[in-house]
Amino acid sequence: MVADERGPVVGRRQGTVAVLVAATLWGTLGIAQEVGAPQAAPATVAGVRSLGGGLALLVWVLLTGCGPRLRAAVRQAPGAVAAAVVSITVFQLAYLTGVRAVGVALGVLIAIGSAPAFAGLLAALTGRRPGRRWLLATAATVAGAAVLLLAGGGDAGQDPSSAGVVVGLLAGAAYGTYTTVSVRLVQAGADGTSTVALTFTGAGLLLLPVLVTGDMSWTGGARGVTTVLWLTLGTTAVGYALFARGLKSLDAPTVTTLTLAEPLAATVLAVVVIQERLSASGWVGAALLVAGLLAVAPLGRRAGATRGRALPGR
């Protein structure tokens, strides 16, 4: 019995670590835009990231012989493919626009902090009620995000009621949708990396008109090339490959809650790199966020035993 439990527990631990590292990489996205491409339109940044990262992952999928599984998923779940492409496109556009509007720390917190609620709502609507552990963890992380929102808005000199908040909430809804439909694609036969490669390449193609007609001068020079490489390889190819690894052993609401490490990393980077400031209450919010991450992370045999209750039928 112990031997039977150990495999799922180890798999969930590895999946948890993979998602946490991925989320930390994503936490650098806003800083990369604001430092590496401060004059670039968010749509062009999203287009470069999507097309470059998606093509890099697509090449890897083909080289590793996963092409047949990718084609099978497209045939079996075309609706999920379309939903994933559209949702990741909307997410990136709204996410980067929100960061530009209200600042890195606040923009990321609004977008990612709201995502678990949307993912849980989608799970409930499809008859897969999130478990009590996820609800408790999400309550802690959302409370932390709320404290950070209030503290960050005041200290950064931004208006928390601005249109940037609405755009950030749109990003959260899109991200929760993307996480949920990505799980459906994996269930349809695609491996996680193939799913990410497909959706990001599709998003890049949707944004291709922006790349053709927009100002791309920010991609030139040493700083521009470095920014492009980090956007495409660091925050996308590597980050989403790790995210795909997590999808193999974790349910959608849990994965989405773990990605709250992204606003934590973004907040720290915003304070250190571009001198955005949070008050003492802001750091209290960050602590609540960490508490939520610790609550949702599977630890030991208890986590393995409760896995089945997180999302019935998985």
Image (cartoon, rainbow, N blue to C red):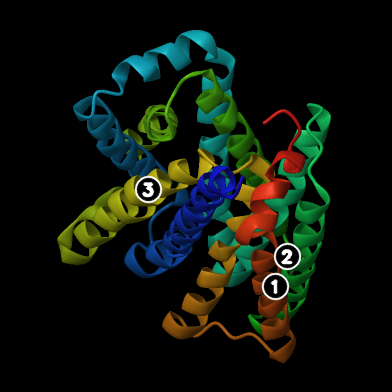
| Figure check: 199 above or below 136 | above
- Residue 111 appearing in the image: no
Look at the numbered disc 3 and give the secondary structure of its residue.
helix
x, y percentage for residue 23?
49, 58
Question: Which of the marked residues, 2 or 1, is nearer the chain's N terminus?
Answer: 2
Q: Answer yes or no: do the residues labelled 2 and 1 have beta carbons within 8 Å? A: yes
Q: Nearer the viewer, mark 2 or mark 1?
A: 1
x, y percentage for residue 237?
33, 45
Mark number for residue 166?
none
- Residue 216 appearing in the image: yes
| Figure check: 248 above or below 126 | below
Q: Is residue 50 left or right of residue 301?
A: left
Q: Nearer the viewer, mark 1 or mark 3?
A: 1
Q: Nearer the viewer, mark 2 or mark 3?
A: 2
Look at label 2 and name its amino acid.
Thr
> For residue 222, which quarter of the picture?
bottom left
Look at the numbered disc 2 and give the secondary structure of its residue.
helix
| Figure check: 111 above or below 126 | below
Q: Quadrant of the C terminus?
A: top right
Residue identifier under label 1 = 291
Q: Residue at x 61, y 44 (%)?
A: 1
Residue identifier under label 3 = 236
Task: Mark 1: give few (<14), some (14-19) or many (20+) Cα within 10 Å.
Answer: some
Q: Residue at x 41, y 27 (%)?
A: 202
- The CA span between labels 1 and 3 is 27 Å
x, y percentage for residue 207?
42, 33
Q: Is residue 178 left or right of residue 283?
A: left
Residue identifier under label 2 = 141
